Structure formats: C-alpha cells, structure tokens
Amino acid sequence: MPEEKKTEEQLRHDIRREFSFSEERDKEKVDSVLELKKKRYDETRKKNELKAKVDELEKSGKPQGENKEPQGNQETQLSVKDSAFLQESKIPVDDWDDVLDYVKYKKQSDKDFDIKKALGSSVLKAELAAKAEERTASNAAHTKKGRGGSSKPDGQALLKQAEKTGEIPESDEEIDAMLDAEWENKSKN
C-alpha cells in the first residue's frame, strides 16, 4: 500500500520502526516526522493535480493563459510594434523602465496609450531630459576627478603668484615647481 493512503496510526508505526523510536520516549520526534511526511504527501498530491491539469490543457490544444485577463500586478505587456519602437528610439536602456512605468500608469485611464504616445508626452520628455542631464553631470564629475591627479602644477604661475602676494605654495610638488621655474628664469638671464 502506498504511504499516502496509509492511516495515521500505520504511518506512526512505520516511523517508529524506520527510526527505532519509542512511542513514549520519542513522541515529539514521531510527531514531527509525521507532520513532515504529511506535508510531503500534500505537496506531491498538489503537484500531481497540476500535472494532470497541464496534460489536460495540452490535449485540448489551448494555451494555458488563454482565458485569463492580464492582471495589474504583472509586467507591462508590449506589442511587437511598441517593443520595436522602444528599441529604435534613442532612449538609453537605463530609462526604459521609466517609460514602461509611465505607459502602465497612463493605460489605467487610456487603454489605447502606447510607447509612441508616451515618447511624445512632455511630462516623460522632461523626466528623461532630467535623467540625461544627471547622467552627463555625473560622467563629467568622474572624468574631471581622473584628470586632476595627473596634472603638473604650473611653476611660472606659482612664481608670479608668490611674487605678487608673498604667499608660498603649501604642497611640496608646487614648491618644487615654483623653485624650478625660478631657477630656469635665473639661468636665462
């Protein structure tokens, strides 16, 4: 007899025998193993039911989701036309989620709203422009940081500044550049 069809008492007996448990001493252990087995049998039963449904649907020739309406919590379904339009637009891939979120939002009130209409929207254009500007500023900041460390101080400019104000540069590198410029000027004269 398959274990799934056994009574609770039969299962308890099998568990005690399989694990050498005593009903009196190991009652909690027997109970926990019994619960685990019941859960496993329940999951197996559910799995078999789902398999049977899938087999039935495959025999009938209907796709699984044919009778279901799209729900609000699913991802936005794009038509081939919308998908192609989005790919051909010059919008960075990073912004596609924003476009799709806007389309999803607008479709709540206008069922015919699509990617093309969204890209023509001044609201979305402004948001995308702001993001592009933010990216540009971020890239410029990163680029400037990279250049700053490798440039040499201008000794002549530092020397002129020191002669005008009497202030000496603080870093060793700037002081060396200023002294080199002064030495160069003296050697020319």
Image (cartoon, helix red, strand yellow):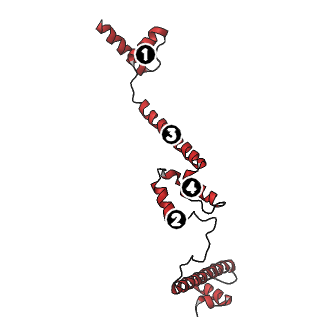
Q: Nearer the viewer, mark 4 or mark 1?
A: 4
> Badges 3 and 2: C-beta atoms under 8 Å apart?
no
Say which residue label 4 marks. Answer: 117
Report how far apart the C-alphas of labels 3 and 2 lie in the structure. 34 Å
**Residue 168, image x and y in percent?**
46, 13
> Badges 1 and 2: C-beta atoms under 8 Å apart?
no
The numbered mark, 3 or 2, whose residue comes first in the sequence reads 2
Q: Secondary structure at mark 4?
A: helix
Type of amino acid under label 2: Ser
- In this view, the residue in front, 140 or 36, is 140
Say which residue label 3 marks. Answer: 138
Instruction: Give the crowd class for mark 2: few <14, some 14-19, many >=20 residues within 10 Å.
Output: few
- In this view, the residue in front, 61 or 170, is 61
> Badges 4 and 1: C-beta atoms under 8 Å apart?
no
Say which residue label 2 marks. Answer: 79
**Residue 179, image x and y in percent?**
38, 14
Report how far apart the C-alphas of labels 1 and 2 lie in the structure. 64 Å
Q: Is residue 103 above or below residue 8?
A: above
Q: Which mark is residue 158?
A: 1
**Residue 181, image x and y in percent?**
36, 14
Q: Is residue 3 something that shows in the picture?
A: yes
Report how far apart the C-alphas of labels 4 and 2 lie in the structure. 14 Å
Q: Nearer the viewer, mark 4 or mark 3?
A: 4
Q: Is residue 98 something that shows in the picture?
A: no
Q: Is residue 138 above or below residue 183?
A: below
Type of amino acid under label 3: Ser
> Badges 4 and 3: C-beta atoms under 8 Å apart?
no
